[in-house]
Image: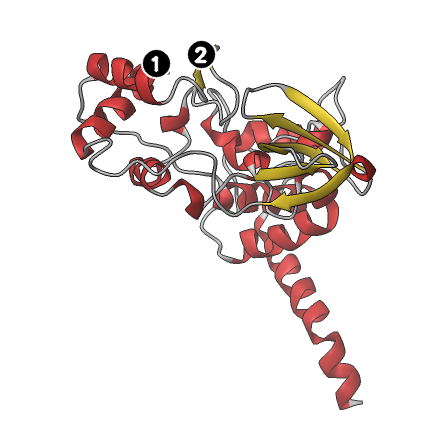
């Protein structure tokens, strides 16, 4: 009897927390403000619900799955006009013409999902960055534009940096410049392919399954390979982006680049 009680306790606890949250939401109509805001239980239970119901398309970390065009939801709140109410409506009603279907969750469950997504949302830079944006543009063109684009101009090997300061803090951006290998975005994982004639092809993975792999090579060309035609597929730990030390870019020069990126939003 005691053993059965121990096994079922987590479910009872979750049901209890859900019941408490249900008491907080008296109306079945979506509200403009999340009624569970500030309740530490909401994002915790919402995270469990997300992993059970949403992770297949959006990933367990909510960062999306590129191969099926499921977006990175941690960036959702960086978009103009997006708030808890609009997120609620998207979850409830879906997005017509996309793979995002409507859902029949109870209102409290939707608000828990909203609470979870709010908790994992990235924080941008709200204050003006102290730098020279004109000089930053020149530095960006010299050091970054070959691989990164801003507002449709530049390279595609690395992440698009349009509105990046709205999505990442200044400290996080500085760290990504100084030590890019410390946290490589999933869509830009480096790989080295070894062909049957021992040719080495470096690039970033765009899609991969058990039989094939598609990469963007260092010349920024999309290339697909059947794995049976390759000697090896080496998943690298070092980013293709070089480390920029202070002798490469001073702290002031990095601030100039970030000031340019902020001004280009």
Quarter of the image with the N terminus is bottom right
Q: Is mark 1 on a helix, strand or loop?
A: loop
Label 2 element class? loop
Q: Name the residue under label 2.
A: 151
- Give the residue at x 48% y 31%: 77
229 relative to 78 in the view: left or right: right
Badge 2, how many Cα within 10 Å: few under 14, some, many 20+?
A: few
**Percent coordinates x, y for residue 253 in the rendering:** 20, 26
Classify the position of the C terminus by image quarter. top left
**Residue 228 percent location from the top left of the image:** 82, 39
Q: Is residue 20 left or right of residue 254?
A: right
User: Residue drawn 59% across and 26% down?
Assistant: 217
Residue named by callout 1: 264
Upstream in the sequence, badge 1 or badge 2?
Answer: 2
| Residue 112 seen from this side | yes
The answer to whether the residues at label 1 and label 2 have Cβ atoms under 8 Å apart is: yes
Q: Is residue 220 left or right of residue 4?
A: left
């Amino acid at each position: 009897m005691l053993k059965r009680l121990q096994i079922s306790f987590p479910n009872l606890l979750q049901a209890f927390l859900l019941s408490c949250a249900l008491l907080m939401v008296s109306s079945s109509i979506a509200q403009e403000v999340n009624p569970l805001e500030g309740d530490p239980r909401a994002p915790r239970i919402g995270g469990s619900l997300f992993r059970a119901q949403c992770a297949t398309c959006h990933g367990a970390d909510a960062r999306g799955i590129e191969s099926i065009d499921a977006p990175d939801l941690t960036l959702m709140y960086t978009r103009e006009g997006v708030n808890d109410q609009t997120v609620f409506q998207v979850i409830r009603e879906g997005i017509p013409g996309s793979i995002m279907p409507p859902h029949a969750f109870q209102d409290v469950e939707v608000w828990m999902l909203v609470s979870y997504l709010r908790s994992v949302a990235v924080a941008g830079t709200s204050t003006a960055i102290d730098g020279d944006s004109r000089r930053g543009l020149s530095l960006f063109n010299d050091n970054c534009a070959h691989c990164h684009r801003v507002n449709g101009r530049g390279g595609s090997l690395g992440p698009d940096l349009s509105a990046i300061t709205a999505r990442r803090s200044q400290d996080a951006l500085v760290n990504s410049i100084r030590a890019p290998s410390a946290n490589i975005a999933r869509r830009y994982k480096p790989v080295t392919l070894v062909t049957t004639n021992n040719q080495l092809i470096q690039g970033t993975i765009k899609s991969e399954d058990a039989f094939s792999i598609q990469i963007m090579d260092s010349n920024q060309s999309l290339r697909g390979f059947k794995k049976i035609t390759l000697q090896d597929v080496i998943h690298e730990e070092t980013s293709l982006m070089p480390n920029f030390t202070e002798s490469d870019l001073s702290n002031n020069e990095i601030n100039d680049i970030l000031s340019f990126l902020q001004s280009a939003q």
